[in-house]
Image (cartoon, helix red, strand yellow):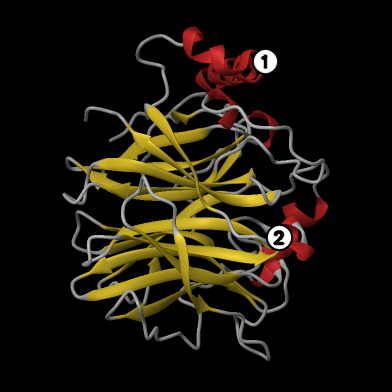
Amino acid sequence: MEKPFTRKEFLQTSALGIAAVFFGSSFTSLLSSDEKPYFNLKPIGRSLALEGYYIWCSSPIWGEDGKVHLFYSRWKKEKGMGGWLNGSEICRAEANSPFDTFEHKQVILTPRGGSFWDATTCHNPLIKKVGNQYLLFFMGTSNGKTNTKRIGLATSKSLYGEWERPDEPLLLPGKEGSWDDHCTTNPAFVKGNDGKYWLFYKSWNTHEYETQKGSIRGNRKYGLAKSDSPEGPYIKISENPVIDFSSLPDNAQLEDAFVWKQKGKYHMIARDMGFFNHEFGLHLTTKDGIHWSKPEVAYLNMKSYITEPTPPKNLNRFGRLERPMLLLDKDGETPRFLFGATQGGEFETSTTYVFEILNKK
């Protein structure tokens, strides 16, 4: 069982996070050899940028053609940064290798309108392959607001489609008053060591979200649902979340989880929302999907790796790498490339950014 972390440890690590923001790229010199970021990263660059669009949620997979296929979300620039809730669509791009620029190829899923559960947005793509079938987990909304975010699953025998889209969501929120009564979103998927398929999801409580003050309302936690089949049905393992930072100071939380199995252990990377700060990535491990280790820094803020021109004031999240996802080696276990979304780029929106992972693991 993973050793849980204490409030004292949280306060100590939070102090390091504050130092990181103050000292910027020199922060790595403040860490001991076993406290340096989990990933040793080499920047490749803004590998997918589209004029007139914000790009988010970049999920890569090796194709049978040897190329890298990237499933990503985009929405029109005139909608602003918040357009992902009401107008995002999911697309596919290709590159010959992770070092190359990606080229947009096709739109995969668009909002269906009407009374569909994904009427107003399609977002959060996560591409996986089980057997001879491709699984495209995603999130949809029916009213352009967070309280109708629902995880769904589209399937295909080919990366090129046709994609069979579900008439119903894959996972629903909890009952009123529960920690996850607001939504289901940010899917993370892996085959478990118990023979079942594990689906991790983010949610929060509606009452907290509607009544709390401050720039970040509600406390985002992660739950776990399991199924005997990758296509579901998925059953939540507990009424309680499996990752919960709400007992810690300053409304600490996390989002954008990606999970993979390596050498018999399960790993998660996620975007930090106050454990260290709001610009780092987190790395956690587990053996059972339920009991998770104390978070460590997975990666630093963008300015620790690259220098770019000052962005326009409307890009107030500039400097973060969000929606972190991995392209594993062809062994299916070893992380080789880190993909993420970050604001900026020549079109002053947001783009895919790719790093090579140099770890010798």
Residue 156 image point, x, y percent:
32, 81
Q: Crowdedness of circle 1 by 10 Å Cα count: few (<14), some, many (20+)?
A: few
Of tags 1 and 2, the one toward the viewer is 1
Observer-nearest of 294 and 50: 50
The count of marks equals: 2
In this view, 238 is above or below 313: below
Q: Residue at x 56, y 17 (%)?
A: 25
Q: Residue furthest bottom?
A: 114
Label 1 sits on residue: 22
Q: Quadrant of the N terminus?
A: top left
Q: Is residue 291 left or right of residue 254?
A: left
**Looking at the image, can residue 334 be seen?**
yes
Corner quadrant of residue 21: top right
User: Which residue type carries mark 1?
Assistant: Phe
The quarter of the displayed image where residue 214 is located: top right
The residue at the point 44 percent across, 57 percent down is 102
Disc 2 crowd, CA 10 A, few/some/many (<14, 14-19, 20+)? many
Pointer 1 or 2: first along the chain: 1
Q: What SS does tag 2 mark?
A: helix
Find disc 2 in the rendering and name its residue: 206
Would residue 189 be seen by someone viewing this image from the given angle? no
Residue 271 percent location from the top left of the image: 54, 41
Say which of 312 and 10 sits in front: 312
C-beta proximity under 8 Å, tags 1 and 2: no
Locate residue 116 relative to residue 153 in the image: left or right. Answer: right
Q: Position of residue 94 (x, y in %)?
A: 39, 63
Q: Residue at x 54, y 14 (%)?
A: 27
The residue at the point 33 percent across, 74 percent down is: 159
Above/below status of 213 relative to 198: above
> Could you say where residue 97 lies in the image, as x and y percent from the top left?
31, 51
Q: Nearer the viewer, residue 255 or 22?
A: 22
Q: Amino acid at mark 2?
A: Thr
